[in-house]
Image (tube, helix red, strand yellow):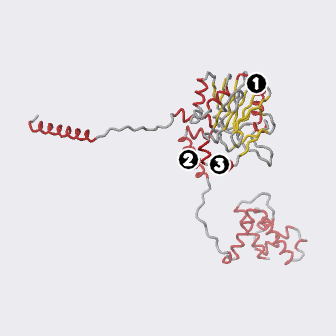
Amino acid sequence: MSRRLTLLLASLVILIGLLLAYLASKATPYEEVVEHGPAPEVAADPYLAARQFLIVQGRQVARTSGLERQPERHPSSQVLLMLGDRSEMTPTQTERLLDWVAEGGHLVFVAEQIWDEATERSGDLLLDALELQQHETAADSTERDTATEQRVPQPRLTRLYLENEDAPAFLAFDTGFHLYDAGHRAHAWANSDDATHMLQLRHGQGLVTALTDAWIWQNAQIGQYDHAWLLWYLTQDRDVQLAYDTEQDSLLRLVMRHFPEALAALLIMVLLGAWHVGQRHGPLIETNDRSRRRLQEHLRASADFLYRRAGPNHLLETLQADVHRRIRSRHPGFDQLPRDQQHQRLAALCQLPTQYIEQALSRPAKALGAAEFTRQVTYLQRIRNSL
């Protein structure tokens, strides 16, 4: 290596070192907290914290994803929490579920529909079967003065009072809904200032707990107030089955999720097939003005129509009838002559051989070809013109 190249590399190393030292003297260390949001498991399961809480409490927890799978064994030792959508629930499933409760099970569910005064039904099969009603509360009636809210630490919370307890449990239910026990069967309830948000009643040997909403047990709210305690209280001494992911994806949605490329290719093939078999239209042909057509064109068009519709035999019979009518009008007594004499007289008038006359006036036994039809029509026209 030459001396000049060595000096050049050394100078470059020194410059880079000085630059790094300058940047290090100007750099200021700092800390930054990056929020990545909840873990994928938490985002996919809104009641994951509730499940983990129950497991820590020693509960046997099972999760179901459909309304058709309901507890079957030992109802007296199980509690079913139906926290998901029940719009697809059938009357048969509702009846089977209430039979399970009557045998000793405990059902906790969320009211979904509002009571309709016109039909005297809500459309929620469980609410209607248990004679429970859900109503909306007036938003204005729940508003409070700001000073009052500052004096009372929990002004709009639901309070649950238990026997032998001095202080109530506080719960943050949605105060926009109210449960009403129309059948007067409830033995326990939880109220806010303006509404009832939890009702508990006996059904056979079992127990039913109705709630206005279950968001208090979702991941972000279960640690607030006494939400976790209520979950423990309702499920104590029983195995727990959670049903909240009850919406089943349709076949089309599953195909769109897992096979979007195949679905797009199928759609393109269908569109191409429809375009291929579809009727193709060429340029429009202008219709000739009818006022400019000649009589010969009309006659030819009429003859073509009759030839296609009625056939050649019909046209021949019409022309033969016209020939006989002219003979009767021009030569009286012609019909009384024998057929041979008729043919001979016509042959003399038309200057045609007798066999042509016989062929022209005879009725064909079968459909004629184009050449035979044209020949016979020519003979008939010659006979008619001669008369």
- The circle drawn on residue 104 is 1
Residue that carries the numbered disc 2 in the rendered image? 268
**Sequence-wise, which precedes: disc 2 or disc 1?**
1
Camera-nearest residue between 190 and 115: 190
Q: What amino acid is at disc 3?
A: Glu
Q: Quadrant of residue 363?
A: bottom right
Give the number of the mark in front: 1 or 3.
3
Q: Is residue 87 above or below residue 243?
A: below
Q: Quadrant of residue 227?
A: top right
Residue visible at 62% across and 56% down in the picture? 279
Q: Quadrant of the C terminus?
A: bottom right
Q: Answer whether labels 1 and 3 touch (C-beta < 8 Å).
A: no
Query: Dot 2: what SS?
Result: helix
Q: What amino acid is at disc 1?
A: Gly
Image position, residue 5 (x, y; %)? 12, 38
Image position, residue 214 (x, y; %)? 65, 36
